[in-house]
Structure formats: C-alpha cells, structure tokens
Amino acid sequence: MIPEQFGRVGVLFGFALLFPAIPLIASYVFYRLRLRPEHPDPIKRATYECGVEAEGSSWGRFNARYYIVALAFVIFDVEVVFLFPWATVFAGMGWVAYFEAVLFVGVLALGLGYAWRRGALEWR
Amino acid sequence: MSDLNFDYTLLIPELILAVAAGIVLLADAFHTELRLNRTLLPGFTVLAALAAGLTSLAWLDTSDDFATLLAVDNFTAFFRVLFAFTLATVVIGSYEFVAREIRHQGEFYAMFLLATLGASVMAASQELLTAYIGLELLSFSLYVAVSLAKRDPRSGEAGLKYVLLGGVASATLLYGLSLIYGSAGSTSYAAISETFAAGTANVELPLLLGLVLVIAGLGFKISAVPFHMWTPDAYEGAPLPVTAILSATSKAGAIALLLRLFSGPLLPVKDDWQWMLAVISLTTMVAGNLIALQQTNIKRLLAYSSIGQVGYMLLAVATISDASASALLLHLGGYTVTNLAVFMAVIAFYNRQRSERIADFRGLAETNPYLALVITAALFSLSGMPLLAGFTTKFILFQAAAQDGYLWLVAIAVVMSTISLYYYLLVIRLMYVQEPDGAPAPDPQTGRLDRPNLRWRTSPASYAVTAVLLLGTIAIGLYATPLLEAADDAAAVLFPA
Amino acid sequence: MIPLENFLVLSAILFALGFYGVLARRSAILILIAVELMLAAVSINMVAFAAYLDPTRFTGIIFAIFVITVAAAEVGLALGIVLRLFRERASANVDEANSLKW
C-alpha cells in the first residue's frame, strides 16, 4: 500500500527531474555533434535577456522598506484562506453566508484603509 | 447546522468592545478630517468598557451558549465584569500618562480594548479553537502595546522578547492542544470530557505529552516558573498602564482558561496533571518571592511579586474543586483590585517624579501622604495583612487548598507570604522613615527645620481611581460576602451540583 | 493508506527541529522562521488527526487554517517589532538585546 503511494509520487518526481534535464542534455549533445550553431554575445549571456538588468549579488541586504509592503501583502493574502471553505458552503447557506463574508472582507478593508492612512504603503 | 444557537445578542459585550476598538483606531487615524479632539479617546474607551461591563450583567443566572463555542453564564459574567472594570480603571488612572508618553494613542486604547475582548473570549470559551483565538487576540494586542512607547528603547526590547517567547509558547500550547484533540477526537470541552470520562481514549502517552505541552504553554501566559523569564523584562520595558493590564487582564484571562480547561474537559484525567500543577505552583511561589527580594525597580518588584501570586493561584487550580475554584475567583477579584491600586498609585507617582526606581519613593509620606497611604495599604494587602482584601481572600484560598490534602504546599505558601511582607516593607520603610530628596538638614544653630514645601498633589483622575481602589481593598477585607457570593455563583457553573 | 504514525513522527521531527532552531539561532528573523516550523508541525498534526480520527467533521482542518492565519499575523507583528529594534540598534541579534536583566 505505502510503496504504491510513494511509487506514484516517485514517478512524478522522476519526471520532474527529467523534464528540464532532457533539453539541457540534448542541447549539449547537439553542440558536440556540431548540429547546433554557437554565436555567444553579452546580451545572450545576461541573466535576464529582457527586463531589468541584474545588479549585485542576490545575498545583498534588502531595504527594510520592502518588509512593510511584504508584511501587508502576507497578512491580507493569508486571510483569503478563510474564503475557500466559505466558497464551498456558500450555495447552501444563502444570504447569511454572503453578508458574513462581506463583513469579513469589510473588516480587512478597514485594516487596509488604516495601513494606507498611516503611510504603510508609501515608499519612505 | 440548524440546531446550533446563533443568537448574536449573547455576544453584545464582546461586540461593543470590538466595534469600540475599530472606532478608536479610525478616529485617531482620521482625527484631522473628523475634527476630533484626541482627548476624547480615553473617555470613549471608558464608556465602551462600562457599556460592556453593564450589558454583561443582563445574563446573570442564565446558562446559554453561542453555537456551543462560547458559554454565557455566571462564570463568563464574572470575568466580563472583572475585565471591564480593569479596563475602565486603568484608562481613567493613566490617561495623563498616555497623553504624554504615547504618540499613537488610538492604537494604544484599541489594543487595550482588543486585549479585553480576547480575555473575555477565553473566559467564555467552550471549545479549544475558540479559546486559542481568544488567547492570541489577548497576546497580540499586548505584544503591540508593550512596544508602543517609541521614546523608550527598553520598550522595543521588551516587545521583542515578549513576542519571540510568546510565539514559542503558543506553538507549544498548540502542539499540546493538537495531541489532546487527537486523543479525544473533538475540540469541544463537553465531548472531550465525555471521551476521557468513559475511558475510551486508549492513548495514555500522547495525552500525557499533550498535557505537559499545554501546561507549559499556558504556564508561559500566566508567567509560572520556569516559564516566567519574559515577565520581568516585559513588565519593566512596557509603559506603566500596559504593565497594569499585563498583570491584571492577561493573568486573569489565562486563569479563567485554566479553570475552564481543568474543571471541564481535563477533569477526568486529573491524576495525570495534578502533580504537574502542584510542582509548578511550588517553584512559582518560591522563585517569584525570593527573586523579588533584590529588585531596585518598582515594576520589576511588582513583576516578581505577581509571579509569586500566580503560585498561590496555581495551588487552587491543582486542587481544583467547587470550593477551591470559588476561592480562586474570590482571590482573583481581590488581587485585581489591590494590584490595580498599586499600579495606579505608581502611575500617579511617575507622572510627577518620572522615576520607577524604588529608591525614589524615599520620603513619599512627607511629600504626598495620600499616595503613600494607598501604596502602603495595597502592598500590605498583597502580602496578606488582616483587615485588607489580601488577607481574607488568601485565607479562604489556602483553606480550600488545604482541604484537598496539599497541606505541605499550603504551609510553603504561608511561609512565602511572610517573605513577601519583607520586600513590601522595604518600600514602605523608604516612604515613611526616610527623608525625601531635597530636604535640607535642620538648622544647626536653632535646630529648627526650615524646609521648602516639597508637597505635591495627585491629579483628580488619579486621586479618584486610587481612592475607589483603596476603598475596595478595605471593603473586601472587612466584608467579602458580596464578592464571595459572586465567586460562588461563578464557580457553581464549573461544578454543577 | 499511510498509517497515522508516519504523520505524527513527521510532525514531531518538524516540531523538534523548530524548537532546536529557536534555541540555537541568534538572529530574531531566524528564530521567527523556526517558530513557523513549529506551527507547521501543529498544522500537520491537526490535519492528520482530522483525516484519521474525526473524518465526518472538519474541526482539525479548520483548526489548521486558523493556525496558518494566526501564524501569518504573528510573523507580521514580530517583524514589525524586530524592524523597530533594528532601526534603534542596527542589529537583529537577540544576544544584543540585553539592557533588561534580572
């Protein structure tokens, strides 16, 4: 019983490993066989070919101001978890459930309004 | 679904507190747009507290529950009134302090209201999850309140220690609760009690582990030794009114939850936890009172003395019965009044002298005899001197505990009470025997004392609050019957005849 | 079916690791991460008990949802306090928060 269940997960895991590995290996093999052309230039070798250029190391310190925004996001993001169980019983409970959820979201909105007013969303 | 009682009117006191907290927060944030005077905030908070306290009297002698999550009965009413009283007293006695020391007053009062709400939910809980949410609401509000004194660097440090250790404690408590849920298959007190009483829960080890973890987690919240390390630091770093709330509301809320848990769902497994609570009670009263002997800061002294008091209260939880639960509630009421009297007097002292050092109480009897009298009476009451609240309530408490066979523990408690008298007397001696700072020596030629007038007056609000609390301390000491009857009624809920 | 014990052992290991982290780490942020680990252990316990012992109701699962949200709120709060202390002292090391003792 257990080996079977872990076996299924194992198959998925193996597939997840193979999926990116196959193109990488194939690319290398084709390069060795001189089937793949190679014309490197700096733009191709950049971390992000399009978008903002990467700067510094990823181990650098982040500005503390990011925390405030991240905190506000995490808290409001996690509260949404209560709406999932609500959504499953909503149909059977009618308007009471609807207004309860409105109240819940309303309290969250008040919290967001308070954070906004206190300048937690400003970049300073 | 339909057989549950969703009567929201049962929760009116809690709803008042919650709505008031929201209004206070927003009124402070938008006070310029609303053209509000911020001095209205404490007044509004007091009104909300009084409204919550008075409305909760409407459910005296009823026994009802909200969706089997919260019970509304005499026990709940007792604590609702106690918490509302504490909140109103602290806010009246400290609004001058707050106006000067705290920048965000709205947040401060909102945290007090939410802490009171959380404590009420804990006292009313009929189910583990509800109790946990109440506990966290209480703790979170206090984490914020402790670190709100932005000008005092100690405040942030106290907040950090409190929040980190508090997080570990609540994780421990939760793990314990999860094991109890696993052993009983339900989180409702009634169902847990049934399962354990029937002996069908064939899970001795997880249950024992769960009990240990729950006692450790709750022991942290009531600052029982050896889980007390945060207490002196949080008490010292917090602004004074928060310290008062920490020692009154937070402690009483946790005791209420302990009573609900150990008199209900966990009573059938009493043999498993009784000795644990007895041991913790012993270490708490010994360590708290002995470490208090060498404190130089009045807040730290009161922190350790409150740890000692928790030891006495745990004594009653360990020997839980109808009589000891009632005695514990009585003691909690008397302790709250006495303790608030000390804190309000210390706040009045701080407003004038800006000092928390015990040494600065020198000569207070000369400079402000009234305040010295209040502090003396309250400290004597805390140590258990006759004629004051502390003696009566402690006497009944120890008597109830002794009847259950823990005579040796009661003997130690009495010894520790005597020791506590020593460090209270040190403060009293400073106030009455020593000369105040700045008093000149008598003129060597004439021998006459020509001193500048060092007298100062207590502000009217502090005067009124301390007077009420002082009278309460004396009244409970002389005639405890009304409070005793209330405690009996509340305890009768836990142990229906 | 995987037996219940496996889940309990997993959660016990996670809880112990978290507790070790709380004791061993010096940075307030890392201590918070360790506390999160302990709370994750609780969630696993709750969900496992709910699935095996109490399958008709969802008490344990709802408990786990509340644990998750309360944990998020706690981290938010604690980080706010750490941030304040960091502004004052330029350090989040708990060993340096030593102005209050005894």
Image (cartoon, rainbow, N blue to C red):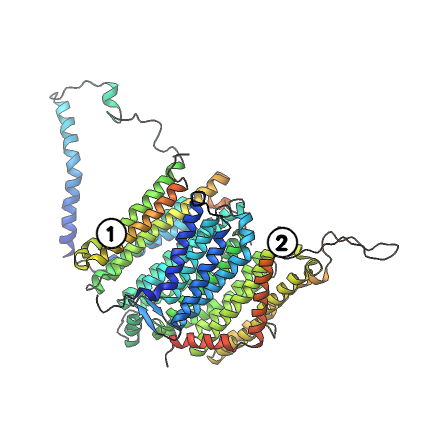
Tell which of B492 and A48 is nearer to you: B492
Tell which of B183 and A32 is nearer to you: B183
Which mark is in front, 2 or 1? 1
| Residue B316 in picture, x, y percent from top left | 47, 73
Q: Is residue B339 visible?
A: yes
- What's the amino acid at mark 1? Leu
Q: Is residue B388 above or below residue B128?
A: below
Please name the residue shown 17% across and 44% down the image.
A13
| Residue A29 in picture, x, y percent from top left | 13, 26
Please name the residue shown 36% across and 69% down the image.
B72
Quadrant showing the C terminus of chain B: bottom left
How many numbered marks have been drawn onto this rendered protein structure?
A: 2
Q: Can you tell which quarter of the image residue C58 is in?
A: bottom left
- Judged left or right of residue B120, residue B193 is left
Tell which of A37 and C55 is nearer to you: C55
Q: Label 2: how many residues lie within 10 Å, few (<14), some (14-19) or many (20+)?
A: some
Q: Which residue is mark 2?
A: B357
Of all chains, the one bearing label 1 is A
Q: Is residue A124 above or below residue B496?
A: above
Please name the residue shown 39% across and 42% down the image.
A117
Q: Which residue is mark 1?
A: A83
**Are the residues under marks 2 and 1 on the same chain?**
no
Tell which of B336 and B262 is nearer to you: B336
Q: Can you tell which quarter of the image residue B326 is in?
A: bottom left
| Residue A79 in picture, x, y percent from top left | 29, 50
For residue B485, which numbered disc appears in the image? none
Quadrant showing the N terminus of chain B: bottom left
